[in-house]
Amino acid sequence: MRNNKLIIIWMIVLLLLIGVGIFAFAWKQHFNENTNKAIAVVQNGEASVVAVDGTPYGFEGQREINVGETIVTRDAEVLLTINGDFFVWVKKNSRLALKAFNETNIDVSLDNGAAWYMHVNSSSSQQFMLETPLTKTIPDGTKLFVTYDATNDESTTLLVQGSAIVKDEFSSIELSPVEKTLRTENNGLRIVELSSDDKQIVNSQLQKDYAILLAARMQEISKYGVALNIIKGKYNLSDKNIEGVIQQIDRGEVSVDDLIKRSPVPIPNIDRLLAFTNEAKQTLSVQKDFANSINSTQ
């Protein structure tokens, strides 16, 4: 009986993997149906968009962002998703403009506040650049945090994962993970130590990133309602059972390769599926390192 129940759970996981693959494909299609799109989603509040002609428009929920428009946050955070691969969390009290968006380049400009960047699909041919009035950051990796304090004319870039080049008009620095640059009006670009606040911010954002990745997959499973609910009811399985298996996959306790081999049908868009799975695993690993770093300094 125990083996039968285990087999059923594994079959649900296979259904989940197929669902995630379809989700990734549908998500990609949503942002890339002949034309690429940048979609801004407001998190818990209201933000505004300043159009190219300077007209501000308040919005809740989600809205497409066009080149030349500026996102202005107040008490809300805004998640900007570009082409389904690039994610920029625009933090509270920030201004971020989409300066360029084409087949080869994506350029966003942070005029005030803070933004967290994450890239899921490392095979993308588009080069991303995040500018402030003082610096230009070109990441070759998945996670970094950029701030610009307009009052004090001060810009920082904190690389969390991957690599990045930070430039000003005089010099450039190639960052390694867990390195931070500072550029002020009167002082050149330089590497500085991470503060305890930096570590807390990164740790908190990593937890949020993983929670979103998990919630997105669980939401997709719910779309397979009828068949999935019959199986869950018959074998007394809950969403927590399924969520637990996802977390086991992300922690490396269950092999994705084995599940793919056991799948009774081909899994659509497998490369994107693996990219999202790898991102979840890496997010957990980096979050653990930062959590340990915080604990060791307390």
Image (cartoon, rainbow, N blue to C red):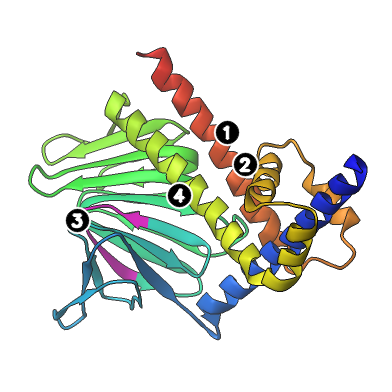
Q: Give the answer, above or below, for where 207 lies relative to 271.
A: above
* Residue denoted by label 4: 139
Count how many numbered circles sit on residues in the image. Answer: 4
- Front position among marks 4 and 1: 1
* Residue denoted by label 1: 285
Query: Amino acid under label 4?
Result: Pro
Residue contact between numbered discs 2 and 4, judged by CB atoms under 8 Å = no
Asked if the stretch drawn in magenta spans residue 97, the answer is yes
Foreground: 38 or 10?
Answer: 10
Q: Is residue 137 left or right of residue 281?
A: left
Q: Whole-Å distance between the Cαs marked 1 and 3?
A: 30 Å
Magenta part of the protein: which range?
A: 89-99
Which tag, 3 or 4, sits closer to the chain's start? 3
Query: Amino acid under label 1?
Result: Ser
The furthest residue to the left:
151
- Front position among marks 1 and 3: 3
Near mark 3 (Cα within 10 A), the count class, few <14, some 14-19 or many ≥20, is few
Q: Give SS at disc 4.
A: strand
Asked if the stretch drawn in magenta spans residue 130, the answer is no
Query: Amino acid under label 2?
Result: Lys
Which tag, 3 or 2, sits closer to the chain's start? 3
Residue at the image position 31 percent from the left and 69 percent from the top: 98
Q: Whole-Å distance between the Cαs marked 2 and 4?
A: 20 Å
